[in-house]
Image (spheres, rainbow, N blue to C red):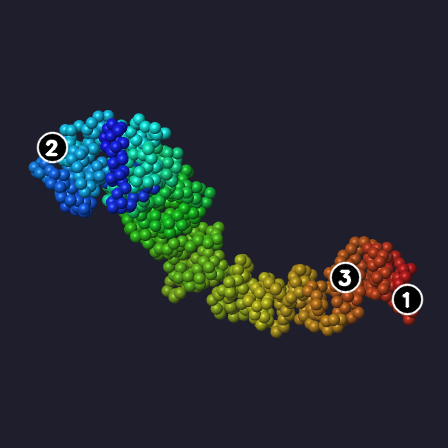
Amino acid sequence: MTIDSRTRLGAALALLLAVVTAATVLIAPAERAEAANAAEFDPGYIISDERFFDYNSMSVAEIQAFLADKEPACTSNPIYPCLKNYVGQTNSRAAAGAGHCTAYDSYGTESAATIIYRVSQACRINAQVLLVMLQKEQGFITSNAPTAYMYQRAMGYACPDNAPCDSKYFGFFNQVYSAAWQLRQYTLKPGSWSYRIGANDILYKPVPNTCDPQRARVNIQNQATANLYIYTPYVPNSAALANLYGVGDNCSSYGNRNFWRYFSDWFGSPTSAGPRQINAEYAVQGGANGPLGLPTSSYITIPQNGGGLGRAYNGGSIYWTGSTGAAPVYGNILTYYFRFGGAAGELQWPNTRIYPMAAGDVAGQGQSYSSGMTVYTSPAGTYRVVGAIRGAYWAAGAATATTGFPQAEASCAGALCSQKFGGGVVYGTGQATAGYQFVPAVIDAGYVKAGGPSGAVGLPTSAASIASSGAAQGFAKASIYAGSGLDAQVVRDEIRSAYWGVGGSGSWLGWPTSAQSCAAGSCTQSFQNGVISIKQGTAGASISSPAIDTAAQGLGSPTSAVQPVGSAGIARAYEKGSVYLRAGASTAYAVSGEIRSRYFANGGATGALGWPTSVTVSGSTTTVGFERGAITSPRAGVSYLVSGAVNTAYVALGGATGSPGPATSEASRISSNGGGIGQAFTAASIYQRDGVTTAFPVSGEIRTRYFSGGGAAGALAWPTSQVITSAANGGGTAQSFTGGSIYQSGSGAFAVTGATRDAYWARGGSDGTLGWPTSEMTCTPTLCTQKFQKATIQWSLAGGAVVV
């Protein structure tokens, strides 16, 4: 049922036509395509402006074919034929003014298809809209037996609710042209009618009625939908939509529902994907309660950059294209986006929502577009990242703790472009992404010092390699390295080739510590563990280690290059020895003569002894300490190896420079008293009993007394403790053994054994009432006696030990 916006049809007639429509049009089984889905019906967006005003959608032939398809069973009626057979009188109409219908020049008599087509062209209304209106008003398109009533009121035009239809608008041509003219009138003066874009209260059906509520709040989203409501001012209720091809309840109306349903069934969705997706995105963003707020415009066609739609809201905009979908732009990013022309500008269409970004402890926002991205942070503001620079930025990880956020716009000088970020700079030339690389700040410092892109090193040619130990990056004519805690240094030419030849920063040389220095035809560059030198006229480069050179004094000429030994250090061979530098150490140590021979026999630096850690020279004796042992050589052809638990005890006492002094023998096997090993040193001997993991040194007067009793092979057997010092009773030292103890004081060193020791310990030993021993034990056939500072202990077989 349709109306002029200012007039309405009587209630009785409205009810009658509603029933007729339901009975003869809505539920005719043969006509139900059932393509429409009521869940997709949006009362605020029934048809898009794009489809409503697409006046080139159908030709005359296509309209004629459509009519024939919809009226296959129509019988011939010469007075009121089906539309496919209709030919009627038309009359010319003058142009209605700028933006309105253009002139219609009558051909005299014209077919229904021709009339529909020519009216569509004159008033720029989609012929499909006119066909659907003919159907939803009178069921005209599918009727097999049209009536005079239907031809008189074909479009329901000028049939108000409160008066009869105005007969001067009767007739097929008159109705079609007048309805199209009126739709164009609504469009030209959108503020002059009852319904317009925005929030509207719309009746469910004509009043008076008993419906509760009588009206629905409808947010009309575009002019074409507003036109439909001005023409037919009722919104379908839930009952009408629940039975899309039938009748609802006593509060249902069907005009706009049927328009949407027929259009969907016959011509596909009446709404374009753009507005639908914009609406869906608007809902995702929270609608009017979200960051966008209320809409402030209809859907606006933007023809630039491939074309699409946009809609403005109080707090932002949503843009849509078929390839990007719908995406909102708002806040600080929107302001910046508009600076560069929005969707019509160089960034083009947004293809993502605004998303959070973080670089270290700095948070920001980003958004991607067809031709770039924008990034916003509170400290720095908003900047574009576009073209090949964007590719390099993303390849480097985009906003991470390493790359950071943009700090400035990109700048170009000729083909050369760069852009600064929190963690470095992207440099490149031309448009190819491969020509751009991110240079981290630690590398960029050395790059700028070397002249940057226009300097001697050229443009970056590879991505930076970043690790906890440092960063490195390749450039056209050099490489730049920045070790952890070190300044960035340029490595180039033959020195770079030699550096790469040994493994670069991952090799024993480590990171460069100085720039290349050249004088008198020679160039050198220092690294953490060595120096690379090149000399004009000499092939290749020389690689040396200052620490090794210092330790090699007196060893003659080198017989090898500096070489890595596994991953733990480097070494170099000379005529009279070898020099080793352990990784992380600053001092190298020489190993020569018999010590080197013995060292090699034990596997060298990768063997049981490990890397040398010290060199001690005492007179003609040299001792080299290793990670897990020591070797002493008192003269040519002789060497003594210290290892295992003996070496642990040796090192604890200071090794060759400590109290034991250099070794004076090999560790030897002692089979007595359960077995073990012992080794002699200048001022001590160290013993390890079998089955015990700890070795104990014996030195001084205690060692002299120990030796006098046969040492480990004697009655005292193996030491079981370190030397203990006590200040009690005048002071002294003591050491325990498996067969007794030796006490050394001002009176000398004496052994206390057996039951006598038990009685001595029972009275506190050297700290007790007896004091220190002052003699060795003496025995007769029946009695043994030992004197102490304050008493004597006598022992007999019959009486045991007695303190006297």
Query: Mark 3 or mark 2, which is nearer the start of the sequence?
Result: 2
Comes first in the chain, label 1 or label 3: 3
Whole-number angstrom distance, CA of label 1 to CA of label 3: 26 Å
Q: Which residue lies furthest to the left in this view?
A: 108
| Mark 3 secondary-structure assignment | strand
Which residue is located at x 31 percent, y 30 percent? 203
Residue picked out by circle 3: 735
Amino acid marked by disc 3: Gln
Residue 636 horizontal/vertical position (percent): 61, 72
Q: Is residue 423 above or below residue 208?
A: below
Tell me whether circle 1 and circle 3 mark residues in contact (CB < 8 Å): no
Q: Which amino acid does label 2 sit on?
A: Arg
- 1 or 2: tag closer to the N-terminus: 2
For the point 39% across and 37% down, which residue is it? 286
Q: Residue 152 carries which label?
A: none
Q: Relative to 619, does residue 315 appear above or below in the rendering?
A: above
How dense is the environment of label 1, judged by Cα within 10 Å: few (below 14), some, or many (20 and up)? some
Q: Which of 412 and 436 is in front in this view?
A: 436
Quickly name the residue at label 1: 796
Q: Which of marks 1 and 3 is in front?
A: 1
Which residue occupies 84% across, 60% down?
760
